[in-house]
Amino acid sequence: MRSAKEVEYLLKAIDAFKNRLIVISPEFKILAANCETPSLKASDIVGQLCHKVFYDRTEPCENCAVRKANQTGRPTLRPKPEESANFEKVPCFYAYPIHTDNKIEAFVSMDFDLPTRGEIEDKLQSSNALLRNLILSAVDGVIAADKKGKILIFNDMAAEIFGYSVEEALGSLNIRDIYPDQEEFEIMKKMRSDAYGGPGKLRSYQVDVIDKSGDRIPINLNAAIVFEGESEIATIGFFHDLREINRMKDELEKTQLQLLQSEKMASLGKLAAGVAHQLNNPLAGITLFTKLVMEDYALEEGAKNDLCRVMEDAERCRDTVKELLEFTRQTRHLMQPHDINRAISRTLFLLENQTLFQNITIEKVLDSSMPTVQSDIQQLNHLFMNIILNAAQAMEGKGQLTLETAYQPEEKLVRIRISDTGPGIPEHILPHIFDPFFTTKEEGKGTGLGLSLVYGIVENHGGQIKAENKTDRGATFTIELPLTPKTEGRNESG
């Protein structure tokens, strides 16, 4: 038996203990306590249910150390330190039974040891700091929002993508503001289904978002619902900007199309060259024997005139074949000095006698002071032929085609203008005419590649091209080519 003095000191020690220490019956009634609550003194706590007094719960706590000690009959630590980090929702940390004659009479419940609890809090703070640094330095935009849409996390990459500062986003931005056409509801619907990565997840979903200026940005979204128990408390999304990837895809597709078209033009060039060579032999025979007939026989004036006409037509065919061979001559894409006026004249020579051009007046205003331009002549031939044919087709074979060249010495470039008197280009179409596969022609009458290749050729030469409507009628294509473009890796200087 302890003396009265010992009992007195033990009671003083219990009262001086800074942590909560209470004695509880198996029915969870408080039998003794060394602590108070904001509304009750220690003496008023006695006799009441512990879970009601401390946590305002109608039932004992789910993770209660006293309940576990009652089941096992042994001291219990609940929960284990690593199982919980929210000390506000943790019940009693440690409980042990009081036995009388091998029967449990009551339980002592107390707070967890302070040094150990401090270690847990330090580890938690360290983990939170690491997690925060990982999110802030992520290469994708990371945004988390509560159920009402208030932004909780908005990292630096999200600020770069959307144009909002982190402070703006956390202070006034709602998650609904970044989605067009109420797309956020569709995203939540998909996250709650099983079809997009499992319940609560959304994987690799392509969606457009809206930045601060109102522009749409293509995004690859991975998102998840954050749960606490069974309740949804927030959502988190990882936003991968697709603009650069899409630009590279478009550039690759454009290059592939140009390569295919170049191969096609090369095949046509070989075919045309073969046909031209085959025509040369009979044309030479026609010319030779016509001369022989005129020299060896005394012919009437009318017959001589007819043979002269044969000679003229044969020579004209010979010149056409010569120009065709020059036009289709296969090169290694050498950049050499070339006369732009001559390239335009050669293209017109091959086109102007075709049926499409019979009712088209062609006006040439070519600057005789034009210097040569470092260029690939085969590409320039294709460039001028595409634009001239497009102009003739736009005029439906009737109107005026004007070709102008001018030297701009102060800018060290030449300017070429090709104008027609057709209906012009509709304003809503004008920004897209150089896009691959864009065409206003009927199906089967155009691929939409012509002007995109023209644009690529001008780019390859370091120049610029633009199209605009004339104030009266028709359209004008303006091409500017530098005298000496920067040599790229795929070109060779001749």
Image (cartoon, rainbow, N blue to C red):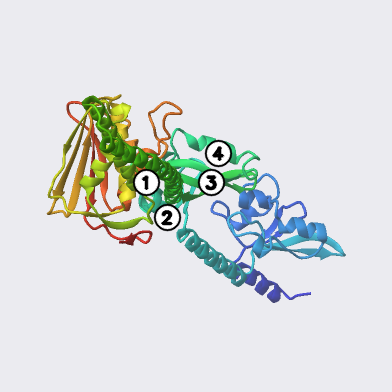
Q: Spatial distance from mark 1 to mark 2, Cα to Cα?
A: 52 Å
Is mark 4 in CB contact (under 8 Å) with mark 3? Answer: yes
Secondary element at image label 4: helix
- Can you see residue 217? yes
- Give the structural element (helix, strand or loop) at label 3: strand
Residue 111, quarter of the rendered image: bottom right
Residue named by callout 3: 235
Find out whether the residues at labels 1 and 2 contact each other: C-beta distance under 8 Å. Answer: no
In the image, taking residue 460 as reference, residue 206 lies left or right, namely: right
Residue at 17% in and 29% down: 471
Q: Do the residues labelled 2 and 3 touch (CB within 8 Å)?
A: no
Tell me which numbered mark, 1 or 2, is placed earlier along the sequence: 2
Determine whether 5 is above or below 470 in the image: below
Circle 1 sits on which residue?
Answer: 328
Q: Which of marks 4 and 1 is in front?
A: 1
Give the vertical position of 394 relative to 370 (above or below): above
Q: Which of marks 4 and 3 is nearer the N terminus?
A: 4
Q: Mark 4 highlights which residue?
A: 188
Q: Quadrant of the C terminus?
A: bottom left
Numbered circle sitting on residue 157: 2
Mark 3 vs mark 1: give the one in front: 1
Question: Picture coordinates of residue 430 (x, y %)?
Answer: 30, 34
Front tag of 1 and 2? 1
**Residue 17 location (% of width, % of height):** 61, 69
Q: Is residue 369 left or right of residue 399?
A: left
Amino acid type of disc 2? Met
**Mark sitting earlier along the chain (2/3):** 2
Q: In which quarter of the image is residue 367?
A: top left
Which amino acid does the dot numbered 4 rest on? Met
